[in-house]
Amino acid sequence: MTCQSPTGASRRRGRPTAHTREQAFDAAMSLFWERGYDGTSFAELVAAMRIGHATFYSAFGSKEELYREATERYVTQYADFFQKALKSGKDTRSSFQSLMEASAHAYPRERHARGCMVSLAGTHVRQY
């Protein structure tokens, strides 16, 4: 379904398409990676994702659900090296060496915040 904006341009209404959803999700994941769950406000999420509040809730459910999905994606897409490195050695010492080498290669990526999204989450927790 499309509608006319005040400027006369057409725009789509409803849930984002799969491609747009992926872009929105990637924007949210980047924020979570950089700032953690507590350090990322809902307003920052919808602004970065370029979606409205209603679209956010219909597409992602809640901030908590979005973060859970982002963490799962991180583990499968960006942290899969961890298990591979640990299993690659013939003993504890060589496995740990493989892990350190793989970490040194993986964590300074230019596309994302540096470091491990899961480990960094603990450093972003607000004190209540």
Image (spheres, helix red, strand yellow):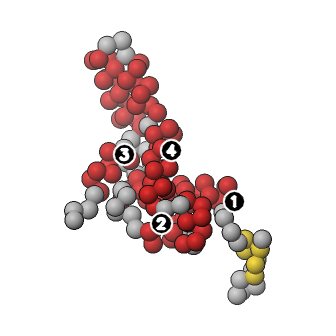
Whether residue 31 is visible, yes or no, is yes
Label 3: which residue? 118
Q: Which amino acid, mark 2?
A: Leu
Spot occupied by residue 30 in the image (x, y as percentages of width and height): 46, 55
Question: Between disc 3 and disc 1, whose residue precedes?
Answer: 1
Q: Which amino acid, mark 1?
A: Thr
Quadrant of residue 6 within the rendered picture: bottom right
Q: Which amino acid, mark 4?
A: Arg
Identify whether 49 is placed above or below 9: above
Question: Between disc 4 and disc 3, whose residue precedes?
Answer: 4
Q: Residue at x 40, y 68 (%)?
A: 41
Q: Which amino acid, mark 3?
A: Val
Q: CA distance from mark 2 to mark 4?
A: 17 Å
Q: Do the CB atoms of the residues marked 2 and 4 lie less than 8 Å apart?
A: no
**Helix, strand or loop under label 1:** loop
Label 4: which residue? 73
Question: Between disc 2 and disc 4, whose residue precedes?
Answer: 2
Label 2: which residue? 45
Question: Between disc 4 and disc 1, whose residue precedes?
Answer: 1
Of residues 65 and 89, the one drawn nearer to the viewer in this rendering: 65
